Amino acid sequence: MWIQTTCNLKFQMGESTPLVLMLRPRSGIQQWIAQEAYTLSPSVAVEEYTDIFGNLCQRLVAPAGEFSIHTSATVLTADVLDEASGAYFVEVQNLPDTVLLYLLPSRYCESDRFGNLAQDIVDGVQLGYDQVSRISNWIRNSIRYSPGSSAFPLSAVEVSAQQEGVCRDLAHLAIALCRSISIPARLVVGFLYGLEPIDLHAWFEAFVGGRWYAFDPTQDTLRGGRLAVAYGRDAADVSVYHQFGPPAIYTSMEVRVALLHGPPG
């Protein structure tokens, strides 16, 4: 399906402030970026680089006063996410080097704390994809998805204790559970068509069957209409902006995802 995504951010800067933004998606297996726009007001010089996770990052210094960012993308994206029941578990010694870091505990995904729970959840389930699917379904049925309930990221331990969280928090718990049974998992942040209430969305991917597969414990089906913008170990790696120096006042964020009837003409 064809979708158009829009994200508008506004800040009030007390002084010139360095920013690192992560707002440009890349084409991949299940998304093709046909058109995009990226506007800064006032206009400033930008340097772009690719981080260790493959994300496109924009580095700039925002001037004092009101500063706004407008991004949009027209994207051909999959109607449904790939599903692969029975996809095999990849033994650690056979994992690609670039995947190994997604096995380790991270700031918000304390996988060393969840071994017993994970084993209980996946008991009797075939190793690999089916284990991840069981974990995602368990979270959907056991942890309350509560949009807007947390302004700051919750770790997997905190989500498990509170028994509720936003999409990002539920993904943290899923990632920690997967890593605790030696399945690499990573966080994805982006857009989802039809999400209510509309906002940026987070889900997770697990490496099984020799590739990454997406899972979303907040949704009943593996529906598509997604645009992935950033990947990382957890929320610390995928923030759409990092600000350095005296705190800037973040005044608003507007997100829209529209269904298009065909490719741009």
Image (cartoon, helix red, strand yellow):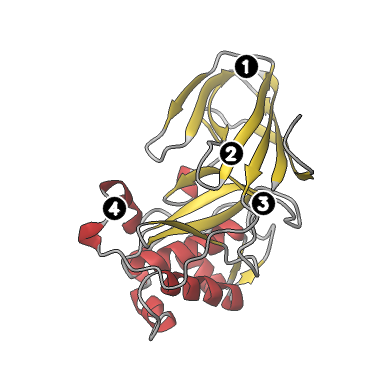
Q: Residues within 10 Å of mark 4 (few under 14, many from 20)?
A: some
Secondary structure beneath dot 2 equals: strand
Q: Earlier in the sequence, mark 2 or mark 1?
A: 2
Answer left or right for 27 relative to 49. right
> How far apart are labels 3 and 2 at the CA level?
12 Å
- Report the amino acid beneath label 2: Trp
Which residue is more in the foreground, 102 or 206? 206
Q: Residue at x 42, y 69 (%)?
A: 129
Report which residue position mark 3 lands on.
Answer: 225
Where residue 63 is drawn, which disc sits there? 1
Answer left or right for 155 relative to 32. left
> How far apart are labels 2 and 1 at the CA level?
33 Å
> How far apart are labels 4 and 1 at the CA level?
40 Å
* Circles 4 and 1 in contact, beta carbons < 8 Å: no
Q: Earlier in the sequence, mark 1 or mark 3?
A: 1
Secondary structure beneath dot 3 equals: loop
Can residue 244 be seen here? The reply is no
Can residue 198 be seen here? The reply is yes
Q: For residue 130, which quarter of the picture?
A: bottom left
* Circles 3 and 2 in contact, beta carbons < 8 Å: no
Q: x and y percent of residue 9 in the render?
A: 69, 33
Secondary structure beneath dot 1 equals: loop
Measured along the vertical axis of the image, is residue 198 above or below residue 252?
A: below
Report which residue position mark 2 lands on.
Answer: 32
- Report the amino acid beneath label 3: Gly
Label 2 or label 1, whichever lies nearer to me, is: 2
Which residue is more in the foreground, 74 or 146? 74
Label 3 or label 4, whichever lies nearer to me, is: 3
Label 3 or label 2, whichever lies nearer to me, is: 2
Where residue 100 is drawn, which disc sits there? 4
Secondary structure beneath dot 4 equals: helix
Q: Residues within 10 Å of mark 1 (few under 14, many from 20)?
A: some
